[in-house]
Amino acid sequence: MSVDWSYFNKYQGIDDMYLPRSGEGDNMATQIVTAVTKLVYKWYNDGDVFDNTYTLPGWANDLSSYANWLYKNCPPAKRVLVGISACDTEGDYEDLLKDLADRCFDEDLLAGYAEKPVVDSIYTADGPFKFEERYDDEDYDEDDYPYEDEYDEEEY
């Protein structure tokens, strides 16, 4: 899947201003930018979605806490995130992420949130979005995942 960098590059100034080097930052604006950036990055890097209980299966990483935090704490994000239930294709999900960035990376919105202290944590938020494992231990068939144990950690 290729990233439409020309689209997301327009937010470089927002990233420079609000994206912390590590963690979620020290105000709500940095939390918003961190959560949205993680959702965008994990989609284009790994194919992960923030709720894999609908049509799009996602991959292996649980991103639901980022979306749940945004849903609870950033009203413009809430209106976009509920659209996950209507995402039938990768293009639909990419459009959702672009809309999320457009709404959340608004300079006036972020300036207001920069005045507010950190609220909870983007890493542990509960809410309506879910991640479901693709198999249970008892249903796990090693033959379905032949490359999973390819590297033995003890060798390194």
Image: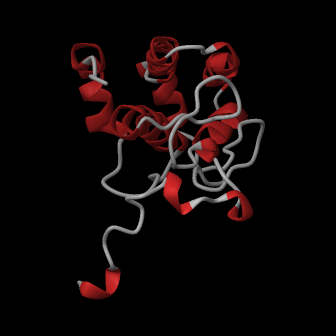
The quarter in which the C terminus is drawn is bottom left
Instruction: Give whichever of 7, 1 is nearer the camera.
Output: 1
Decide if residue 24 is on the left or right side of residue 54.
Answer: left
Q: How many marks?
A: 0
Relative to 138, residue 5 above or below: above
Q: Is residue 107 above or below residue 14?
A: above
Q: How is the image coloured?
A: secondary structure
Residue 92 percent across, percent down from the top left? 52, 12
The spot of residue 144 in percent (x, y) is 52, 52
Compare residues 51 and 106 and report the one nearer the observer: 51
Please tell me which residue is depicted at 30% across the width and 20% down the height of the picture. Answer: 8
Residue drawn at point x = 29 percent, y = 14 percent: 7
Q: Which one is nearer the viewer's eye here, 99 or 147?
A: 147
**Where's residue 93, x and y in %?**
51, 19
- Which residue is outermost to the right? 128
For the N terminus, give its image quadrant: top left
Which residue lies at the image location 60% right of the left edge and 59% below the top edge?
141
Q: Quadrant of residue 138?
A: bottom right
